[in-house]
Structure formats: structure tokens, C-alpha cells
Amino acid sequence: MIQAKASTGLVALLGHPVQHSLSPLMHNAAFAASGQNLVYLAFDVEPGNLAAALAGLKALGIRGANVTVPHKEAVIPCLDAVDPVAARIGAVNTIVNEDRCLKGYNTDGSGFLRSLVEAGFDPAGKRVVILGAGGAARAVAFALAAAGCASLVLANRTPERATELAGALAGAGLPAPVVYRLGDAGMRPEVEAADLVLNTTSLGMWPRVEETPLPPDWFRPGQWVYDLVYNPLETKFLAGARRRGCRVFSGLDMLLYQGAAAFTLWTGREAPVAVMDRVLREAMGASSGGPAAGR
Ligand code: ATR
């Protein structure tokens, strides 16, 4: 645990709610392991107080922040500058306070990509199915397009949202993504043909662990299957994929690497990912089936 001194800097998490976030554990362990004179604290900020909280970041000289549900989009007009990647995604999850200029970044997409690459999956030339079309889907879709994936198929409960994301991806160097309503049996051949199938919906998240966005017999052995949900670590979706002989990833991998990228933005240093990973897995082991959630 960091011994806070008068010179200790602060990094804040702004969300609503925040009490189950794993980020304070992860980042405080990272700051301690790498000798950073920083502490990370979570603040429950109601939507009506977001602008005041950001003014507070500036007034107090707070080093930076993470932004989570429900503020990732709403925070953008309150910032002094927004990184082009975050602007395209339309969501900010990390803020750096550079001489009282608040600049917003999005590390979800880059963190997601790094988790794939660390595991040995190169998205270039691959066919990808994305289930969901919310903020997380936008971040990973832009990252996959930038990494040169061959095609994207989008499926969402509200197909209009997937169509809107497909439109936003025009010019990203991909064929126009095909859009389905989530659960449409017509997309089964697309799922079977995919190299990577990705759940970005909240289906299967604790406590609704019996939900899954796809029947498991749609998976093909040898596919890579990724669930951005990390509580539980193995969702029904992932358990079905694993039983079919797929290579599976939980959302803890993305949580880790989006955090590592944010650490680097605040400190200019490489993040101690082994320490962060251990802390996250210990916390999930300790709270399996419990309410740990969100960044
Ligand atoms: P996030 O930032 O985590 O992506 P979000 O923007 O609220 O959060 O998006 C949530 C995603 O989960 C959306 O794709 C949402 O589908 P809709 O666009 O139709 O709302 C999906 N989702 C949430 N609950 C769902 C449910 N019960 N069934 C199917 N999809 C669901």
C-alpha cells in the first residue's frame, strides 16, 4: 500500500456506480510496484455532477482519471482536447491532466487488441463477428478495422444501432459490415465461418449467468471466442465455446490491457502487467459469483 505524502498525486475513477470496480486494486498495485508516487481512488459521480467533477480535476491538479459507465460519451464536451481515436469511437475512458488541460483518450480498443496479440492472435486478414453495438463494440470494431481484419459482421438486439456502427466504419478500409438482429438464425453460417467471435453485450454477466448471446452449437472447433464480460470469468458463452474446442478469452484480459495503456498515459512508463494481472485474478477468485463489475 502506498504511503501518501504531501507530494502524492491522485488518479480518479469517475463513474456511477463505482463501488465494485477492480481498477483501484489494479492501479494501486501497479503504482506501488513501479514506485509511482500516485494513488488511485474511485468517485461515485452522478450524471448531473460530471461537469463539476471535471472542473474539480483541474482545480485540484489531479493527474488523470478513468471514466466509466455512464459517463464515457457525456464526458467528451467537458474536455479541452480529445485524441482522434477516442473522437472516432465517440467515447473516452481515460483522461490526462496536462498543465490543467484535460485530454481524453480511449484505451479500450487498444487494450483489446493488445490482449489478442499477447495471446498470439493477429487480427490482420481475419473474419470477425461482433455481438452487440454499444460503446464497447464501437471501441473494438474500430481497433479491429485499424488492425486490418478482413471483414466484420455485426449483430445487435437493436439492429439499427449496429447499422449506425456499420455506417461509422465506412472509410475504415473494410467491406461494409453485414448487420443482423441478435439471435437471427440466418447468421449461423457467418458465425461458423468466423475466425473470432466476440460478445460485447452484457448477456451472461453476473447475476444473470444463465443468459448467452449464441447457442453453443454454432461455434466451430479451433475458433477464437472472446467475451468482454469478466464476471463470471467463464460465462455460459465461453463455457459453450470451450466445450466445442474453441480458444477462449474473458473480459479480464481487456480490463488488464486497457488499464496498462491508461497507466502509460498517466506515467509515461510501461505498466507492470504481471502485477496487475495477478491482482485482478486474485480479486476475481476471491469474489467469484459476486458483484465485482465495471471499470
Ligand atoms: P457498453 O459500453 O458496455 O458497450 P452499452 O453501450 O450500454 O454498454 O451497450 C450494451 C450492449 O449490450 C448493447 O449492444 C445492447 O443491445 P441494445 O443496443 O439493443 O441495447 C446489449 N444488451 C444489453 N442487454 C441486452 C439484452 N438483455 N439482450 C441483448 N442485448 C443486450
Image (cartoon, grey):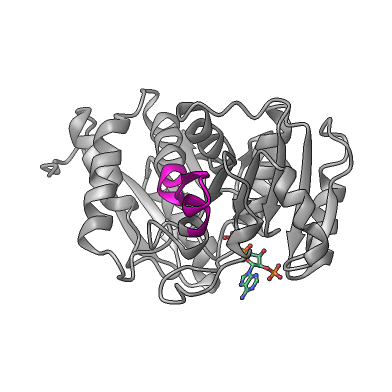
User: In the rendered image of this protein, does residue 9 appear above or below residue 191?
Assistant: above
The one nearer the camera, 44 or 262, is: 262
Residue 223 position, x and y percent, is 59, 41
Residue 242 at what x, y percent from top left?
Answer: 47, 50
Q: Which image quadrant shows ligand 1?
A: bottom right
The residue that appears at 38% across and 34% down in the rendered structure is 263
- Answer with left or right where residue 4 lies relative to residue 143: left
Question: Residue at image x 60%, y 26%?
Answer: 122
Range of magenta residues: 240-255
Screen quadrant of the N terminus: top left
On whether residue 251 falls in the magenta region, the answer is: yes
Instruction: Confirm whether the magenta stretch covers residue 200.
Output: no
Residue 259 lies, in percent from the top left, at 41, 41
Decide if residue 208 is on the left or right side of residue 164. Answer: left
Quadrant (top left, top right, bottom left, bottom right) of the C terminus: bottom left
Picture quadrant where residue 265 is located? top left
Tell me what residue is drawn at x 38 percent, y 40 percent.
Answer: 63
Query: x and y percent of residue 217 in the render?
Result: 62, 59
25 and 288: which is toward the camera: 288
